[in-house]
Image: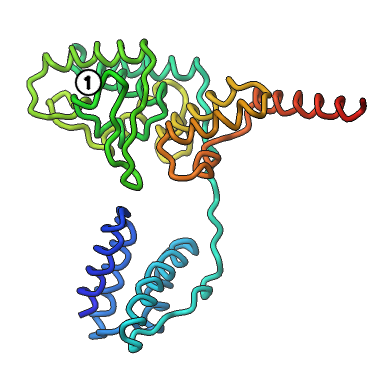
Amino acid sequence: MLSEAVNRHIELYRSMGFKYKVQAYILHSFADFAQGRSEEFIQTDSVLEWAASAPSVRQRHDRLLTVRRLACALNAEDNRHQVPPDDVFGRARRTRRACHIFTQDEIDRLLRAASHLTPTGSIRPITYTALLSLIVCTGLRVSEALNLELPDLTEDGLLIRATKFQKSRIVPLHESARRGLQKYIRARHRVATTASTVFISRWGARLPYPTVNATFLYLARSAGLRPGPGLGGCRIHDARHTFAVRSLEQCGGDRKAIARHICALSTYLGHAHVSDTYWYLQATPKLLSDVAAAAEALYRAGER
């Protein structure tokens, strides 16, 4: 059965450390489509018809390549599985969405808005103030912050357990960040809860990502940082971009210092490759000024 082959393929990737969530959804969707036609083997015509039903070029391209990888693996065992071409829908280019680099004033406005969340006197405003503060000052992924458990606050910093690419790491904390987090935990201990995670809802339950994201959008609008619902603007993930950019701004124009900093930053952010760290960087007036100063110094040195 094709569905059994799909399950084996998904388990293989997950055994190698991949989460494979989106790909699993795509493969199960194709398997349902093929089995609706009573097909036990991958047929090129069926793959192309199913992939073409996606609403965008990017999605059609992703569907095709995901199933094609499965087809290549299955074809090696049984050539009755056909391998579709990889360029039927063109080669969709991955575009980088422009990120928002928060200013200190914008961060202050977000935190003030968080402190005024209702119900007044509940743990909710305290939780979101602490959560946003931690993400801003450490550059953690939102999922990493939400998955933190009480024992993960160690003397050396935050223990981030097996996140992206199954990597664990220690994230050192500035003393002010440690004090702020400990103050929140003292308030958290006054709430009846069985949750082991650091950040909890006003009902004492684990905070789910969709709720956190929706609350951030509400706070951003309240702080005047986003327009109304359905319109673009800053995202909670932009705090991670901001951390990467602001930390690089502290290096000045020393090329050796920048090289050392990028390696350290890549490790701190939990990236598998330094190229992943470059994805988070964006030009700012400060960085462009440093580049101009370095170029000027290089030019003057060449005149001597």
* 284 vs 171, nearest the viewer: 171
x, y percent for residue 250: 58, 20
Q: Residues within 10 Å of mark 1 (few under 14, many from 20)?
A: many
Horizontally, is 21 left or right of 87 in the view?
Answer: left
Picture coordinates of residue 273, whole percent (x, y): 48, 45
Q: Residue at x 44, y 31 (%)?
A: 240
As drawn, the residue found furthest toward the bottom would be 80
**Displayed quadrant of residue 254:** top right
Looking at the rendering, which quadrant does residue 302 occupy? top right
Q: Considering the numbered disc 1 on the image, is that residue within a helix, a strand or a loop?
A: helix
Q: Which residue is located at x 38 percent, y 84 percent?
A: 82
List x then y, in percent, for residue 33.
28, 76
The quarter of the picture where the N terminus appears is bottom left
108 shown above or below 17: above
Q: Position of residue 43 (x, y in %)?
A: 36, 84
Position of 5 relative to 119 (above/below): below
9 with respect to 138 (left or right):
left
Q: Which residue is mark 1?
A: 124
Q: Nearer the viewer, residue 116 or 96?
A: 96
Where is residue 176, by image quadrant? top left
Where the C terminus falls, by quadrant? top right
Residue lying at 29% horizontally and 62% vertically, measured from the top left: 24
Q: Is residue 27 left or right of residue 235?
A: left
Q: Amino acid at mark 1?
A: Arg
Residue at point 50%, 30% (across, down): 244
